[in-house]
Amino acid sequence: MADGTFRGPRMDAMALHDLTAFRHTHAFDPGNRAGERRTWIVVAITAAAMVAEIAAGWITGSMALLADGWHMGTHVVALSVSGIAYLLARRWAADDRFAFGTWKIEVLGAFTSALLLGVVALAMAVESVQRFFRPETIDYQPALVVATIGLAVNIASALVLGGHGGDHHDHHDHHDHHDHHDHPGHHDHEGHGHHGHHGHDLNLGSAYAHVLTDAFTSVLAIAALGAGLLFGWAWLDPAMGLVGAVVIAWWSRGLIADSARVLLDREMDSPVVEEIRRAIQSDGDAEIADLHVWRVGRASHAAVVTVVAREPLSPAAYRERVAAIASLRHVSVEVNRCPHGDCP
């Protein structure tokens, strides 16, 4: 070209070959529609209780009702994050811009929700410590009513979220095997049709954690308020607040660690890694020079494998060796002959 710019072949030109057998969907996790529905039901229950408590607190002038109503508002926000994550993951499931599907949107929702849970724990701890040094007069009877209402709402929400089948997929998708070859090394890409055991739904787990922690703090509050009403132990209220804050922080830490591990693709200590190594290297000739494994669904992994051998087989042959590993849903294999003949 006169302007010195290279013009490659048009990308929209008619394909020279039929590539149908080599193409597959990258939606490796079918989602959890049952979990999504239950999450939105709990959002509705919690939001209704929040509005009722705030309205009752406003009418009666009860600060306890107002405070608990706004506290429920934080859980409405956190639970809505889980619901929106489900919605977006499902909406964009067929979007080709997501190379390995949209499941990690759900994991990102779980991570965000876990962070919010940590903020709640920190706020509880600060408030409890302040009340040790600046005790406030507690109207025990209305406060007990509020705590009991909160516990009832959280028990109902826990029953909804923990219902049978909440962690199961509503449908299954299957992929055909496909491979292609490249040089100087041969490459093979495969989408497995195996499903294996369903993994834990981190997004639903984060919503469940919000409900359970709130129920737990309601139980602690009822115990503290009951002791204060019967025995005058006002110190027990902030003490129980600190206990609740520590437990919530612990649960938050676990959720953050689990979701961060997935988001950062920290999977190389997973048992499936050793399964892949044993399967590929089973003939005593092939050796894995490079291996990358990451999660693309609750119970689905993807892998990139570089194999070096004195007498290399086809990529399809090495692919067949890992076909029995149920969680592997997408595998890319590169095969190279040992350049100097001195490979073990």
Image (spheres, rainbow, N blue to C red):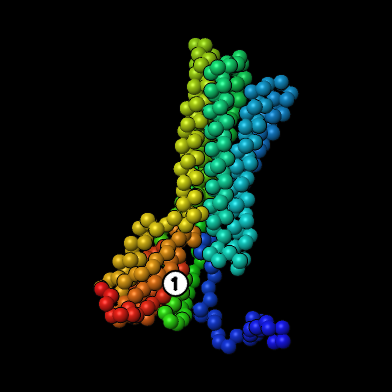
Q: Say left or right for 308 vs 61.
A: left
Could you tell me which quadrant the C terminus lies in? bottom left
Residue 146 in percent (x, y) is at 61, 25
Residue 66 position (above or below residue 343): above
Residue 220 position (above or below residue 14): above
Label 1 Cα crowd, 10 Å radius (few <14 / some 14-19 / many 20+): many
The residue under the point 49% across, 55% down is: 264
- How many numbered dots are placed on residues in this image? 1
Name the residue nearer the viewer: 283 or 1: 1
- Give SS at disc 1: strand
Could you tell me which quadrant the N terminus lies in? bottom right
Residue 215 position (above or below residue 97): above
The residue labelled by disc 1 is 332
Q: Say left or right for 132 vs 77.
A: left
The residue under the point 60% across, 68% down is: 96
The kind of residue tagged 1 is Ser
Q: Say left or right for 325 vs 52.
A: left
Name the residue nearer the viewer: 275 or 58: 275
Residue 20 falls in image quadrant: bottom right
Residue 278 in percent (x, y) is at 30, 66
Given the current orientation, which residue lies at the most extreme right position?
A: 59
Residue 81 in percent (x, y) is at 61, 47
The residue under the point 47% across, 77% down is: 178
Q: Say left or right for 227 vs 271.
A: right
Residue 210 position (above or below residue 23): above
Query: Can residue 338 be seen in the rendering of this structure?
Result: yes
Residue 76 in percent (x, y) is at 63, 40
The residue under the point 56% across, 19% down is: 131
Query: Can residue 320 be seen in the rendering of this structure?
Result: no
